[in-house]
Image (tube, rainbow, N blue to C red):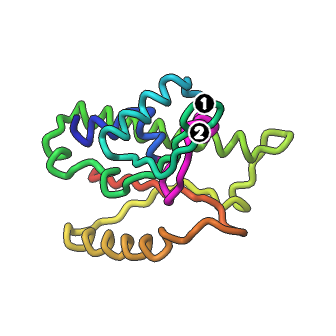
Amino acid sequence: MGSAELLLHPVRLRVVQALLGDRALTTAQLGELLPDVPAATLYRQVSVLVEGQVLQVVTERKVRGAVERTYRLVQAAAEVDVSELRRMTADQHRRGFLTFVAGLLAGFDRYLEAHADGDGRVDPVADRLTYRQTVMYLSDDELDEMLHQFGRLVAQFRDTPAGPGRSRRAISIVLLKE
């Protein structure tokens, strides 16, 4: 199975996203984060990701006669290979992008459910929630430089460990050529 087929599956992509940020989670913990995914489906898709070496087992322990495994994302394996991206058809890209956007929507729904007050309101300013779009006119070289600088900025903060006063935050990027 190619990396695109492995990663651009709706449930597997959500599992990968849940484990981003150097998290180590059991399948039960993943189930709590993905309550709409049936347990049998979740276990099956986690197994596929382990077989594809996208997830690795970091601990095992006996729990009531069963083995509970804790998984961690293999970061280098959690990206679609560039050569594979180039071979994908427009329809395959469309399906992959739809899977990505569906994951964004699911994350946004989880935010709304977790942070809405009794009247169903959230405070995006206090929560530092944003969704916005801008347009720029850039040459390929200028775009490459911007992405390089953005990558350095993200790398500076990406490995900050979880701790008091820190919230898990997801930054998703879509770059379109119009």
38 left or right of 136 in image = right
Nearer to the camera, 75 or 141: 75
Name the residue at 25% across, 70% down: 144
Specify the amino acid type for callout 1. Answer: Gly
Q: Is residue 130 above or below residue 112?
A: below
Percent across and percent down for residue 138 are 27, 68
Q: Residues within 10 Å of mark 2 (few under 14, many from 20)?
A: few
Q: In front: 130, or 37? A: 37
Secondary structure under tag 1 reads loop
| Residue 37 quadrant | top right
Q: Where are the magenta residues, as a range?
A: 17-34
Coordinates of residue 49 in the picture (x, y in percent): 37, 39
SS for dot 2: strand
Query: Observer-nearest residue: 23 or 145?
Result: 23
**Mark 1 nearby-residue class (10 Å; few <14, some 14–19, many ≥20):** few
Percent position of residue 154, x then y: 44, 70
Q: In whole angstroms, how far apart are the C-alphas of marks 1 and 2?
A: 6 Å
Q: Position of residue 159 (x, y in %)?
A: 49, 70
- Residue occupying the point 66% across, 68% down: 163
Q: Is residue 77 left or right of residue 127?
A: left
Q: Which residue bears the numbered disc 2?
A: 62
Q: Is residue 106 visible?
A: no
Residue type indicated by callout 2: Lys
**Is 38 included in the stretch rendered in magenta?**
no
Residue under label 1: 65
Residue 114 in view in this figure = yes
Q: Residue furthest right?
A: 118
- Specify the quadrant that holds the N terminus: top left
Which residue is pictured at 66% across the width and 45% down the height? Answer: 111
> Disc 1 vs disc 2: Cβ atoms closer than 8 Å?
yes
